[in-house]
Amino acid sequence: MKSELIKKIEEADLPEKTKNDLKKYLGDQDISKSQFETILGRIKEEYANTRIEPCEAVGVIAAQSIGEPGTQMTMRTFHYAGVAEINVTLGLPRLIEIMDARKTPSTPTMTIYLAGDYATNRDMAREVSWQIEAAPLHEFGDITTDMLDMRVNVHLNRDVCKKRKITIDEIIDRSPQKIKDKNHYRDFEFEGDSENAIISFMPKDRESYQNLFSLAEHVRKVIVQGIDDIERVVVRKENGEYILYTEGSNLKGVFEVDGVDTSRTRTNNIAEISEVLGIEAGRNAIIDEALSTLREQGIAVDVRHIMLVADMMCIEGEVKQIGRHGIAGEKESVLSRASFEVTVNHLLDAAIANEVDILEGVTENVIVGQPIQLGTGDVKLIAKSRVN
Amino acid sequence: MSTNFSVISHVMVPDHQIMSVEEIDELLSSYQITRDQLPKIYHDDPAVKEVGAKINDVIRIVRISQTAGRAEAYRMVVKRPKK
């Protein structure tokens, strides 16, 4: 294709994608200059027609376009579907979760991609999974409660420790500290014997068996390897690389593990993404999650509607829910807020705060019986006085 | 967080660029809006910290759009309100 034509395409007021398509389809065609001009002209015209017109009520269209297929979801699913033996909430409950901007989803899960050799070597991938999966102390040895001497003894299994790439000393160092920090349980003393791989815990108050048993419970459950929030890790091979799927999510923690690809690893916890990666990543996460939830149900909703919703949720710099505590509750207009939910409270608060409603939105104007400022209602014409 | 980790390199984070004063003026006049009508981004947003933007800067975000291929968005850096 002639560079002169490419330049013309580049200069046109068209989206990037259309330009690339044009270059692709016209690339190997032998067309004359006037033919090219006609094609470009028609495309420009067509593009202008597809653009949404000023004053169009895009929000209502988006609401309807997501809401109507949403009603079909209710009937079909309230179930869970397994991906790689891991349960993930899908269907309408998940969609509600996304729109409500919950701090934690009901089934947090991560997709962890691995970097370099870790992605192709099964054993190395398994190693990473051990660094991530939360492993309680009882998985590394036998725990016995000695009621005579009032102590809890842990006999560590050297083979398991070796296989899991953790040293006896590390466990001896970490476990008492972890019980103190994470479980906030401090009334105990401990002795570590790395020669024989034994750790003993003694309660401070040796009079009560109850203390001994609650200590034993803490010792059993203390997490000595992995990331606390991640309960389970499944290694799967997809498209020639090993990928870890997890139950539980901790993006920050996982990013610190060696071998994790920090550029692709993701979670389904939108709040966590926007906190760790920023609001723009949060916006992308909302779009991706909502779209994949709908698509999984076989419902085709145009991305543009979801993009609009995601934009509104992220416009203030943090992820806000759609509803009383988010977008709908922070509208400028008193009447608009009052017409949504908890009417009396809004009217009362507005009266106390001496709020003024300037009647700019749709709802307010419908309430007071004025033409709404949408479509042709938003255009104000000023007639020029005739000059004689 | 480890020092070698950069949020910008993540696939979900689009490119963030600090705009010059001239660019901001041009943007505002082309849309006929004021600064505070722009969408916001908090000053402690990880991506903002990475590009080193200050409060009241305007950031150009070059998104990889599913519809347009490439789309530009703008956000003004504001202080995170206290709860």
Image (tube, coloured by chain):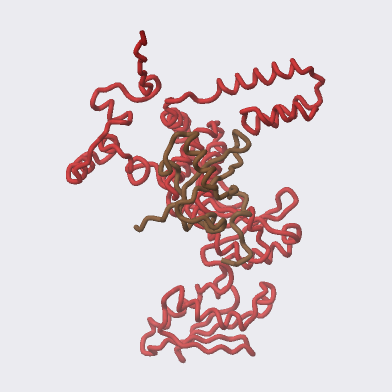
Chain colours: A red, B brown
Residue A6 coordinates in the image, percent (x, y): 74, 29
Furthest toward the bottom, the residue is A149
Which residue is pictured at 24% across the width and 23% down the height?
A369
Give above or below for A388 relative to A58.
Answer: above
* Quarter of the picture holding the C terminus of chain A: top left
Residue A69 coordinates in the image, percent (x, y): 48, 30
Q: In terms of image quadrants, where is residue A59?
A: top left
In front here: A188 or A300?
A300
Which residue is pictured at 60% across the width and 54% down the height?
B8
Residue A187 coordinates in the image, percent (x, y): 40, 84
Can residue A106 be seen here?
Answer: no
Give the left or right position of residue B31, taking residue A352 as reference: right
* Quarter of the picture holding the N terminus of chain A: top right
Residue B16 coordinates in the image, percent (x, y): 57, 49
Give above or below for A135 relative to A345.
Answer: below
In front here: B41 or B9?
B41
Q: In terms of image quadrants, where is residue A288?
A: top right
Total labels: the figure holds: 0
Give above or below for A200 relative to A297.
Answer: below
Can residue A61 be seen here?
Answer: yes
Furthest toward the top, the residue is A388
Give the left or right position of residue B30, taking residue A157 as reference: left
In front here: A196 or B16?
B16
Which residue is pictured at 60% across the width and 80% down the height?
A170
Q: In terms of image quadrants, where is residue A326?
A: top left
Which residue is pictured at 60% across the width and 34% down the height?
B68
Give the left or right position of residue A290, taking residue A341 as reference: right
Give above or below for A141 relative to A277.
Answer: below
In front here: A249 or A359?
A359
